[in-house]
Image (cartoon, coloured by chain):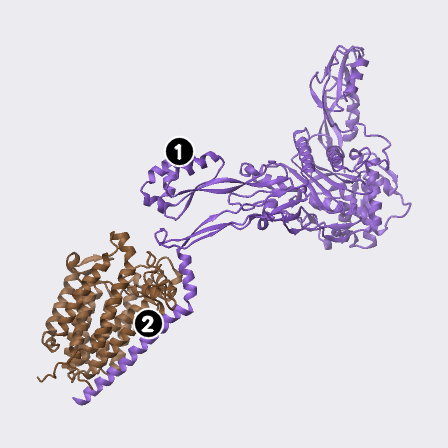
Amino acid sequence: MHRPKRGKPDFIIFFAAVMLLVIGIVMVFSASSVVAYMDKGDTFFYLKRQFLWASIGVLAMIMAMNFEYYHLHRFADLIFLLALSLLVLVLFAGISSHGSSRWLGVGPLSFQPSEAIKIAIVIFMAKSLSGNQDKIHSFFRGVIPHIAVLMLACGLIVGQPDLGTAVAVAGTVYLMFAASGVKFSHLAMLAMAGLGLIATAIMIEPYRFKRFLAFLDPWADPMETGFQTIQSLLALGSGGLFGMGLGQSRQKFFYLPERHTDFIYAILGEELGFIGASLVLLLFVLILWRGFKVALTVKDKFGSLLAVGITCMIVLQMIINVAVVTGSMPVTGITLPLVSYGGSSLVFTLIGIGILLNISRYAADK
Amino acid sequence: MKTSDVSIKKRIAKLFILMVGVIFFLTMRVGYIQFVRGDELQKKALDNRLREVTIKSKRGTIYDRNLKELAVSISADSVLAFPPQIRKSDKEEEIAKKLAEILEMDEKDILRKITQNSSSVWIKRKIQDFEKGKKLKDLNLVGVEVIEDSQRFYPHDTLACHVLGFAGVDNQGLEGIEIVFDEDLKGVPGRIVIEHDAKERELPQAMHRYIPPENGNNLVLTIDETIQYIVERELDQLMASETDPESATIIVMEPKTFEILALGSRPAYDPNNYNEYPQKTWRNIAVSNSYEPGSTFKIITAAAALEENVIGEDEKFHDPGFIKVGSERIRCWAHVPHGVQTFEEAMQNSCNPALVTVGLKLKEKDRGLFYKYIRGFGFGKKTGVTLPGEADGLMILEEDLKDINIATIAIGQGIAVTPMQLISAVSASANGGRFMRPHLVKEVRDNENKLIKKFGNTEVRQVISEETSKELCSLLEKVVVDGTGLPGYIEGYRVAAKTGTAQKAGAGGYMQGRYVASFVGFAPANDPQLAILVVVDEPKGYPYYGGTVAGPIFKRIMEDSLHYLGVSKQSAGEVPSEIPGEPAPRKDVQVPAVDGMNLDDAKQKLYAAGLKSSVQGQGDMVLSQLPKTGATVKEGTEIILYTGGGGEEITIPNMSGKRIYEAVEILEALGLRLKTKGWGEAHRQIPEPGEKVKKGTEVEVWFQDNGE
């Protein structure tokens, strides 16, 4: 197969990702220092780990950036099967925390298979959707088999249980469906079916239903179910235009839960104001723009769909996270990619960015 | 292949627009939260983090009209603990032990309190002992603060308790003036506000705010401590006497201003320890009790009649002992009919048939007339005095008013009034017919003694004319000089007054042997300075008449108060044709030793000591005396001197058919004591008539039927 000459990676994506990473490290430190000191006796506890993982992630990104993405086409099935088997494993041998088991491994070496599946399924779907372009218009021969694979992965994730990640994965794959040319009528049907499934998942689990109600009116139960949303809004709302200043968050003093993970964007908004909060959104828009530009300019469909998938995976998680922080949707437990604390997420997201950068090296400049 | 590529590109472009749109929406959402709702959320977040410790304001002082303190706030230490700090110190047990030791409280209780899940907790409020507070301050325990708290103190204990009321542990007014003027008295509590984290620790660079408390304003009452004291003294004496009533109320008012100079009731309580008294003692019966006023209400009937000129110049009233109204028969209270009398004489006699006639004359002139005056004098409606729990009194609905009702209301039956209403009505009659709102508070002043509010006299209406008022005054003066009001007579002062004795109504009619004795009046009659109402509820034994039970009390308060106020004695005014036979005893005197003395010398010596004497026996040497030498008795008490010899045996007379006051006269003359049962005419007695007994023996007489 003829390959175009390898060029330079897209600088804007690289720049935006590194910016987000730096902002993330600073904010993780700011948001976590008090709790780290109180709980762990070490102000830098989370900073050190985040920095370590970011370094590993950047190394992985650089490696991925230099690894010809079309080799992934060959290993796509293998990668996906590996990620799936890790998901199965986590169901039986996972480390439990907060009532769900999402972790594999021991201590600092533990990681979340659900983070691996995000990138694995994007690679798998990119290969499968690009390879089955002739069948993509057919509902039964084209759409259903992919849905079956997706349902398998999502089912395993929901089993942890982690509905939020399942929704993010399904959303990403759905966007890839849309990009790959699945008929609008089929897309509409899938959307309805998906919403129905989510609604069912919410209704059958009392805690999810409470969260959903709390989203509709957080002030109805400010101390229990509405607590996170309210504290998040209080933090974000305190920011104003310029924020209270870096390190000056008040809500991080045990008021806002998950302050350096799920709700880091609220602390960021409190400390850096609208300027900081919208700058972060702008950086994601840059990734979205450049990622899609790569998808449009790369010559092969696999690369194109891979670029779309990775971009959507990152941006969609951001959208869900910011929507939760702003009280626009129920609390789901999705972190802010590249910014929130969390090793697995960081490493796999950076690998994704690396792949995207590698694809960009083959995108023909116009 | 090519078309497919194009379609993918189109799809990606659409997707891009969609996602940018969503991100744009989120940006707007962030902006909305940060700008539109920013201030609100920021404030909420701050409130969320602020922890407050309230610092009590000092409650204002309540003064009497001469700025003597009636209620003050004194400082007391309170102990406040901060559980998070204590938990952090890991010295919970030690701290609990020390606190328990000094405060003499249960150690476990304290430990539970200081480790509970709250930012602050009171360990003990208002420690009376300053030493304890000082000890705790010196110990300087972690997370324990000794805070100066204020405590209400009523320096005169029960004095004016029903006027003052009391304030609770949190300085909130709970009764009396304390509750009605709570807003003025309580002040604004101060606060210490500190910004805390969610685990109750102070934040670094926390916001500190100290808002000092604003102390409450002071009240200056219309009460005169001295007159109040006189009233309390009389009430105490009354309650301790043989009369031993269920309850009693006295109000002293200045008729010209309607300022209440004194108000006292029994049973009373000590507002310093109000919790130790039954709640019913907190009730201010002077405003919350409605009772049938009886003959005192004849003042209102007379006032209306005089104003409306329904009585002819020389009109005579005939009292055959009763009057028929429709099919009903209203008796006069006296056994002997009053016969033919002028209106003036009828008032002096408190003659029921005459006053009923007057009431009916008012009705004839205009049906609504009598009620117009009754309402005009403020009955049937709260007076608006600033005390809680005031009653309206009870009046038969005007549309249900029958002749018999008008007839009985004319003599004070079939209407219920509060003592406050009656004294106000009488004050209006004395005050040239001007009815005002009775009041207790003159001024509100701040801590620097600056005047904040002044409560003037609020004239409500002119009920009767100045002339009628004058006429009424002289009419009531004659009641004292020449009528039933005689016990209220004070030498040198022109007193106008009216007695009242009403049988208490209960379920199924009037209750035998239960009366409300009252006496109301004012002085001097030509220039009224004081109006006083004395109401005695259910006096025990005999006599129970308003004149005999309440009259002397009225007299003593009036005399002492006029004297205290420096109202000079008058030479003018009529003198009673007979000085009251037994002026009410006043001073306590010690009985001198007269046994062994010559009878005449003994009498002389007793007279010099302000005592009277009565002789038992025919001898001329005093063999013994009763009460014994050295006993403390009231001035004017009769000392019995035994001289030996015969004549000690007395034959019991037949009391059958006699009324109580007749029986009293007869038995008293014989030196026997009367114990009454019931009311009306005598029908049974023990011992039987004709039996020989010793002097001083008690004769028990049963009476029947209904009188006044």
The shade of chain A is brown
Badge 2 and badge 1 both on one subunit: no
Q: Quadrant of residue A291?
A: bottom left
Residue A305 position (above or below residue A41): below
Q: Of residues B367 and A138, which is closer to you in this image? A: A138
Q: Amino acid at mark 2?
A: Ser
Q: Quadrant of residue A206?
A: bottom left
> Label 1: chain?
B
Residue A278 - label: 2
Query: Looking at the figure, which quarter contains the C terminus of chain B?
Result: top right
Q: Secondary structure at mark 2?
A: helix
The total number of labels drawn is 2
Closer to viewer: mark 2 or mark 1: 2
Q: Is residue A338 above or below residue A188?
A: above
In the depicted structure, whether residue B57 falls above or below residue B543: below
The residue type indicated by label 1 comes to: Glu
- Disc 2: CA contacts within 10 A as few (<14), some (14-19) or many (>=20): many
Task: State which quarter of the image contains the N terminus of chain B.
Answer: bottom left
Q: What is the CA distance from the residue labelled 2 to the residue labelled 1?
A: 60 Å
Q: Is residue B452 visible?
A: yes
- Chain of the residue under label 2: A
Query: Dot 1: what SS?
Result: helix
Among the chains pictured, the one given purple colouring is B
- Disc 1: CA contacts within 10 A as few (<14), some (14-19) or many (>=20): few
Residue A248 occupies which quadrant of the picture? bottom left
Residue B106 percent across, percent down from the top left: 39, 35
Q: Is residue B319 visible?
A: no
Measuring from the top left, give residue A287's x and y in whole percent. 24, 75
Whether residue A267 sits left or right of residue A90 in the image: it is: right
Q: Which of the pair B576/B125 is nearer the observer? A: B125
Point out residue B202 in the picture as x, y percentages from the top left corner. Answer: 37, 51
Q: Which mark is residue B101?
A: 1
